[in-house]
Amino acid sequence: MTGKIFRYAFLVGVLALLLCAMLYFGLQYRQTLDETYDALRQEAVYAARGISLEGRRYLEGLPVEKRITWIDAEGNVLYDSLGRELPNQAGLPEVEEARAQGAGQATRPSESEGSANLYYACLLEDGTVLRLSSPVSALREALVTVSPVLWVFVLVLTASGVLAFRAAKQILKPVNELDLDHLGEARSYPELTPLITRLQEQRLTIQEQIEELHQRQKEFSVLTENMTEGFLLLDREGRVLSINAAARLLLPQAVIGEQLSEDVDLTARESSILALGGSRGEAVFSRDEHSWQLVASPVRSRSRIVGAVLLWLDVTEREQRERLRQEFSANVSHELKTPLTSISGFAELMAQGTVPPDKVVEFSAEIQRQSQRLITLVQDIIRLSRLDEGARLPEPESVDLLELGEDVLDSLRSLAEQQGLRLEAQGERVRIRGVWQLLNEMVYNLCDNAIKYNRPGGSVCLSTGRLEGCPFLRVSDTGIGIPEQEQSRVFERFYRVDKSHSKQIGGTGLGLSIVKHGAQYHGARVSLESKPGVGTAVTLIFPNTDPQPAEAD
C-alpha cells in the first residue's frame, strides 16, 4: 500500500512538473517570439524613416545585423542587405499582408537560405515594402539561456519523491493502527475490514434514505405543480418553504426562503399570520374577473405549530352560479309579483262590489290577460329549469327546418296581421336531427320576438339553407333593432333592452334564454346581427347531423 501511494504521489509530482515545464517553455517561446517581432517592428520604423530621408544610401550604410530587403510595388527587390539575387517577392504572405493591412509578419523557410526565419514587413508611404528578418535559431538560443530552470525542476522532482515517500508512510501509519473495537491497538492493514464494512452499510442506508426522500420530494413537486389550486407552505417563522405555479401567479412577490413581504396581497399576509397563530381562516376575494377562496390552516407537530398551509381555491364558477341564482330569484319574484298584484287588485275591487257594471268585462279581461302572462312566465321558467337540470327529452328525430318554420309562422299569422306585418318563409329544405318540441319552441320564440319588436307595416322573414355545409335557420325582421352595447346580454334571463316596451307587449324576458339553451342542447351556434332602426337577424347554425335532403312536398 505504501508503494502504491508513493508511486501515485510521485507520478502526480512528475506530471505536474512536466506540465509546468511545458507551460513555462511555451510561454517563454511565445514571449521571445513576440519580443523578436517587436524588435523587428521597431527597427523597421527606424529604417523606414531613414529610407524616406536618404533612400538606398541609408540602407547601404547600415551594419549587417538583420537581413533587410526593400521591395518595390511590383514585388521586385530594390535592395537586399546580403547582396543576393532574389526572385519577385509579390506572392509572399508577409508582403501581401503588408500591402493589404500596412504591416505583415510570417514564419517560413527562406527561399535563398533554406532555414526557417521570422519575417516582418511594413508598407512605406511611396508604396514600396520594407522587410526585416531574423532566423528562428535565435529563438532557440534565447531559450537555452533559461537552462538553469531545468536544474530547479530536477531539485523539485527529487524533493517531490522524498516528500511522497514520507507522506505515504505518515498516511498509512494511523490507518494501519486503526481498530474500531480497540482504538489504537490495530497494527495491520487488514484490521480495517470492520470499519470498511460498517461504513459501507451506513452508506447504503443513507443512500436509500436519500433516494426515498428525493422520490417523495419529486412526487410532492409533481402533485403541487399540477394542482389548479394555489399552494403555499410556510415554516414557523413565516418563511416560504414551497409554492406552486398557481400560487406564484397570485403572489409573484413570494420568494422561497424569505418571509412574505409588504408587497404581498394583504389577504394572504393576514391569513398567514392567523394560521401561524394557531387559528384557521377563510376569505373570499376577487381578482381579474376570478373569485378565489383562501383557506389558511396551521401545521402542528406534537402540539406545536411548525408552519402554515395556504390554499387558494378557484370559486369563480360557484360565485357566478350564486350570483345568477340570486338574480334569477329576484327577477322571478319581480315578474311573478307584477301580474299577481294586478290580478289581486282587480279581483279585490270586484269582490267589494265597487266596480261599475260596464267595467266588469274590462276588469275580467285584464285579469285574464295577466293570468295568461303568469302562465306563460311559469311555463318558460319550467322549460329553462328542465334544460338546466338536463331533464330527459323526447328522442331526436329528423326535422325539416323549412317546414317547421312555416308551421310556426302560420300559428303567428293572426298576431302579425293585427300589426300589419308580412310573414315570409323561404330557402331550401334541410333536415337535422333534433327534438321537434324544443326546436319548435326555439323558432317560435324567435318569430314571436320578431313580431313583437317590429314596426307597423314591417316584415318578418324566415330562411333556411346551408352555410359552409351546415344547416341553418335565420329569422330576420325590420323592427326597432338592438344597440350594439346591449347585444351581448340579450340572451341573459329576464334581460330586456327596452323595459317599457317589453312591459307593454307582455314579454317575459326568457325567450332568447330558451333559444340559447336549446341551441346548446342541439350543439348549434347562435349569431345575432342587429342595427337600431333597421332590424335584427338571429341565425341558428346546426351541426350536419342529417345530411340526407328533405323529401319534396
Image (cartoon, rainbow, N blue to C red):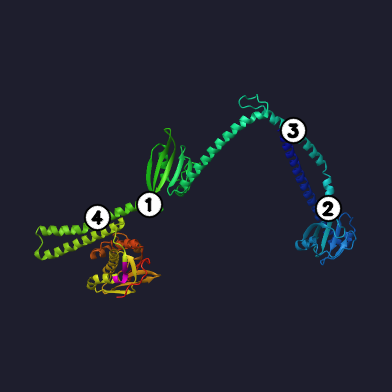
Q: Does 528 sit above or below residue 280?
A: below
Residue occupying image coordinates x 75% and y 45%:
23
Picture quadrant where residue 283 is located: top left
Q: Nearer the viewer, mark 2 or mark 3?
A: 3
- Apparent side of residue 439 relative to residue 163 in the rendered image (left or right): left
Q: Nearer the viewer, mark 3 or mark 1?
A: 3
Q: Nearer the viewer, mark 4 or mark 3?
A: 3
Q: CA–CA distance between discs 3 and 1?
A: 77 Å
Answer whether labels 2 and 4 touch (C-beta < 8 Å). no
Describe the element under mark 3 as helix, strand or loop. helix
Picture quadrant where residue 451 is located: bottom left
Picture quadrant where residue 8 is located: top right
**Residue range corresponding to the magenta coloring:** 398-403
Describe the element under mark 2 as helix, strand or loop. loop
- Counting residues from the N terminus, which is met first, the one under dot 1 or under dot 2? 2
- Identify the residue position indicated by label 1 in the image: 316
- Identify the residue position indicated by label 2 in the image: 136
Residue 531 visible, this angle: no
